[in-house]
Image (tube, helix red, strand yellow):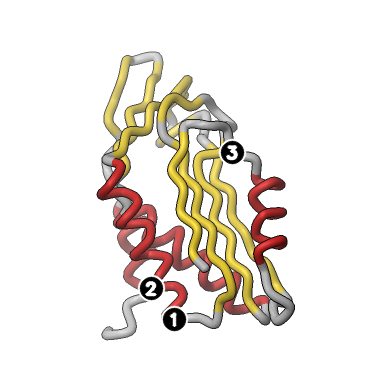
Amino acid sequence: MIHIRVTDKVLDAAAETRQLIDASSEGMGAIASFCGLMRANNEGQAVSAMTLEYYPGMTKKALQAIAEQAVERWNLGNVHVVHRHGDLEPSDPIVFVGCSSAHRADAFLACEFIMDYLKTEAPFWKKERTGKGETWVHARHSDDQAKQRWDTKA
């Protein structure tokens, strides 16, 4: 089962993990998760806050498609993807990805895959506030490279 949520509420990784455990069937022996936090700096620049914007219909569909790709690649029970939008401060959780599976390898790989694709394919727009003003965050080449390693056609 895939669960996708985009919210302006504070993320609680422990509560999200508990929901994933509760939703898992008897055959599941592993849960892997990732919780991304807002960094207080970006490329050497101190960041005091960030605003995340998104387009509701488009973003949820993109997250759903990414999770579905993970389910096709690995033997997963449940996949939970929860992403924040709105105003954030350093150390605020931004994203939670959790996967249950019969064995740990599938859960770990699926979480990593989802994050690599989320960073490049999910339509979120980030504006950072620094001592120099507000700046839109551009895509990183390193995120594109991370996504490319999952390309099985190469």
Q: Residue at x 38, y 20 (%)?
A: 129
As measured in the structure, the alpha-carbon distance from the residue carrying label 3 to the one carrying label 2 is: 24 Å
Secondary element under disc 3, as helix, strand or loop, is loop
Type of amino acid under label 1: Arg
> What is the quadrant of residue 51 in the picture?
top left
Q: How crowded is the residue under tag 1: few (<14 C-alpha within 10 Å), some, or many (20+)?
A: few
Q: Quadrant of the C terminus?
A: bottom left
Type of amino acid under label 3: Leu
Secondary element under disc 2, as helix, strand or loop, is helix
As measured in the structure, the alpha-carbon distance from the residue carrying label 1 to the one carrying label 3 is: 27 Å
Secondary element under disc 1, as helix, strand or loop, is helix
Q: Residue at x 41, y 61 (%)?
A: 116
Instruction: For the residues labelled 1 and 3, say whether their Cβ atoms are less than 8 Å apart.
Output: no
Q: Residue at x 67, y 76 (%)?
A: 104
On residue 69, the disc is: 2
Question: Mark 1 sits on what residue?
Answer: 73
Question: Mark 3 sits on what residue?
Answer: 11
Question: Which is nearer the eye, 25 or 149?
Answer: 25
